[in-house]
Image (cartoon, grey):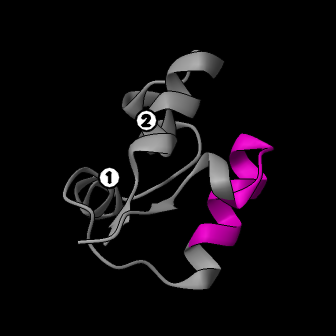
């Protein structure tokens, strides 16, 4: 299973709220919902998140064996 818990940790460390992601960075609410529920994301979306947060992929997602 892919977990996006690192994403939540990263935005907390950087002081970025979901409000800011939606309103300043123009991320959709559906993307935030996918992250909250560990739903699948495209590599393009993961790349965009890395650019926005200026971080590495492991700061956004991790693999957890089921």
Foreground: 1 or 56? 1
* Local SS, label 2: helix
Name the spot of residue 7 as percent of width and height, x first: 50, 44
The residue sitting at 71% across, 48% down in the picture is 52
Q: Quarter of the image for the N terminus: give it.
A: bottom left
State how far apart marks 2 and 1 are (Cα).
10 Å
Judging by the rendered image, the residue that carries numbered circle 1 is 32
65 vs 20: above or below: below
Please state the horizontal and vertical placement of residue 38, each as a whole percent of the image. Answer: 27, 63
Label 2: few (<14), some or many (≥20) within 10 Å?
Answer: some
Quadrant placement of the C terminus = bottom left
In magenta segment, residue 25: no
- Up the image or down, 17 lies above or below 24; here it is above
Label 1 crowd bin: few (<14), some (14–19), many (20+), radius 10 Å: some
Task: Identify the residue at horizontal 67%, vertical 65% (top origin).
Answer: 48
Q: Identify residue for label 2.
A: 8
- Tell me the tag on residue 47: none
* Side of 55 relative to 46 (left or right): right
Say which label, 2 or 1, has the lower sequence index: 2
SS for callout 1: helix
Specify the farthest residue to the front: 65
Q: Is residue 14 above or below residue 27?
A: above
**Which image quarter: residue 47?**
bottom right
Residue appearing at x 42%, y 77% in the figure = 41
Q: Does 17 sit left or right of 57 as displayed?
A: left
- Give the residue drawn at x 22%, y 56%: 33
Question: In terms of secondary structure, what is the magenta stretch mainly?
Answer: helix
Q: Is residue 47 magenta?
A: yes
Magenta part of the protein: which range?
A: 46-57
Query: Picture coordinates of residue 36 (x, y %)?
Result: 24, 50
Tell me where residue 51 sits by quadrant.
Answer: bottom right
């Amino acid at each position: 299973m892919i977990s996006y818990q690192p994403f939540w940790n990263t935005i907390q460390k950087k002081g970025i709220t979901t409000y800011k992601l939606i309103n300043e960075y123009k991320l959709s609410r559906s993307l935030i919902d996918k992250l909250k529920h560990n739903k699948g994301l495209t590599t393009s979306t993961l790349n965009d998140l890395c650019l926005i947060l200026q971080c590495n992929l492991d700061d956004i997602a991790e693999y957890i064996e089921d």
